[in-house]
Image: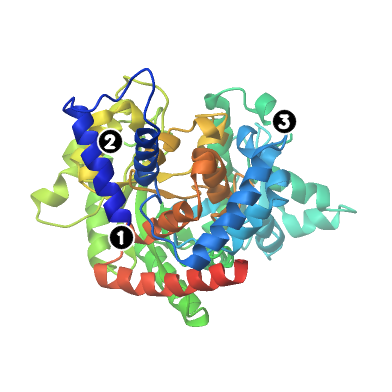
Amino acid sequence: MRSLVRNSVVVFMLLVVLGWIPLCSGRPDPSQRESLMREEAFRRTGGGVLLTQEELDLNTKVQKLKAQEMVLPEFPPTMHFFKATPFIQRSPIFSLLKRMPKGAALHVHDFSMVDMEWVVKNVTYRENCYVCFTDDQSVRFLFSFGQPKPLPHCSSWSLLKTLRSKIANSTALDNSFIRNLTLVTKDPDSAYPNQDIVWKKFEQAFLVVYGLVTYAPVFKDYFYEALREFYTDNVMYIEMRALLPETYELDGRRNDRAWSLQACQDVLRQFMREHADFFGARIIFTVHRGINDTEAIKAVEEAMKLHREFPEIMAGFDFVGREDAGRPLWYFREALSLPEERGVTLPYFFHAGETNYEGTEVDQNVLDALLFNTTRIGHGFAMVHHPLAKELSRKMNVAVEVCPISNQVLKLVSDLRNHPAAVLMSEGHPLVISSDDPAIFGASGLSYDFYEAFMAFGGMNSHLGTLKELSMNSIRYSSLSPEMKEKAFAIWQKKWDKFVSESL
């Protein structure tokens, strides 16, 4: 039936184009209007998904809840996420999305995945944890057998166990640590009036957590907790951007990147033994986009080596850091051409288009990412301003990784109804929803970002079919092999069917 409807619409539009049927007239034909509306609906993300009767029944319930929520005076997508969070948490739609099997998280960063309260309450209470306070009112942490060497622009190191013993109530101290590890604040508009300020605090948070998570025992525990938190949010597979920095032991010994990858692989195997329905995780090795060309060549060479030695867990390569302040992809063309020149496969997963500055060198990253045969495009916020890149992306089947909350908190967009991904979804462009740095934004897993996308991008045009296709896209556009994708789809489908039946 659906194919007949679509064929009739196509024939009708062809006749309009040829001029045999006037599209506009003084009294439009209602049947023509209905045909156009059906065609628009079909093109949207999820528009071509056939729903079972149970799914249709659940969709009726979901759309009713959605209609009630969209007329509330406090509609979360119109608010800054920090202010919207309590409203989202009370939402019946959010409650449903938390239970929904969301497939995979394909754009998350290594040291911003775990709840920062867990980091403070679990990690900083361990033995031999030191802290120092910086001149710019931040903090640094380090594990050490004895008094660490002093850092520039930082107070002398204090053993946290001793410091806490001198304080009657350490809650205020812990809360100050959490504030340094996240961007969350009651008045984000005043705290972060522009992108420069919010990005400075954002990158500062990574420096704060760095000394904790690069301590070798914590590194393993942190990765396990990241898997657990996403699994709890009904995510079954993760592709994580990771710097894979050297980790350190209590005596100061250093472990290289191969150690870190092996540690991730060991922890992952343990987690999968304990959680049979979790499908796995892979690492996208990243370096900062502020490096020079010589350093980039070394990084790509190391990425090729790691990809060869750890094919099971190593997915590919990317650059990270603020795109507007970093070097454009084209600057690294010599380094990025190395794998093809050497006959080596190294998949790329480039951040590109995380900018609202048009016409700059960075603005061309979207097109250059496609020229370098990227597997996916991270953020792609600027994609709608590049029609050729958008067309190539569709033809090459390169999905855009959309991270709504990140784009709002980092001040690319204020009202999420105006996010460019709304246009991409209306066209059925290949895309996935992910959460980027949820712990730094006071979020967790994928549910918050799914909520913002579902409620904001399509309005009442988004439905259960939209959610189903977005969830399936996360597996479809993953780096898994075709055979592994087939197995992942089978596991996801069972979870989806159970979710539908239990949600009616």
Closer mark to the observer between disc 1 and disc 2: 2
Quadrant of residue 378 in the image? top left
C-alpha span from label 1 to label 2: 21 Å
Q: Residue 263 at x, y = what percent?
A: 43, 69
Mark nearer the N terminus (1 vs 3) = 3
Residue 286 shows up from this direction: yes
Q: Name the residue under label 2.
A: 390
Q: Residue 10 at x, y = what percent?
A: 24, 41
Q: Which residue is drawn at 68% across and 44% down?
A: 68
Q: What residue type is labelled 3?
A: Asp
CB under 8 Å between discs 1 and 2: no
Q: Residue 224 at x, y = what percent?
A: 53, 68
Q: Which of 498 and 207 is in front in this view?
A: 498
Q: Mark 1 points at which residue?
A: 479
Q: What residue type is labelled 1?
A: Ser
Side of 115 relative to 426 (left or right): right
Q: Which residue is drawn at 46% across and 77% down?
A: 272
As helix, strand or loop, the secondary structure at mark 3 comes to loop
As helix, strand or loop, the secondary structure at mark 2 comes to helix
Side of 464 relative to 141 (left or right): left
Instruction: Name the quadrant of the N terminus.
Output: bottom left
C-alpha span from label 2 to label 3: 36 Å
Q: Mark 3 points at which residue?
A: 187
Label 1: how many residues lie within 10 Å, few (<14), some (14-19) or many (20+)? many
Instruction: Work out whether 227 lies above or below 490.
Output: above
Instruction: Work out whether 378 lies above or below 129.
Output: above
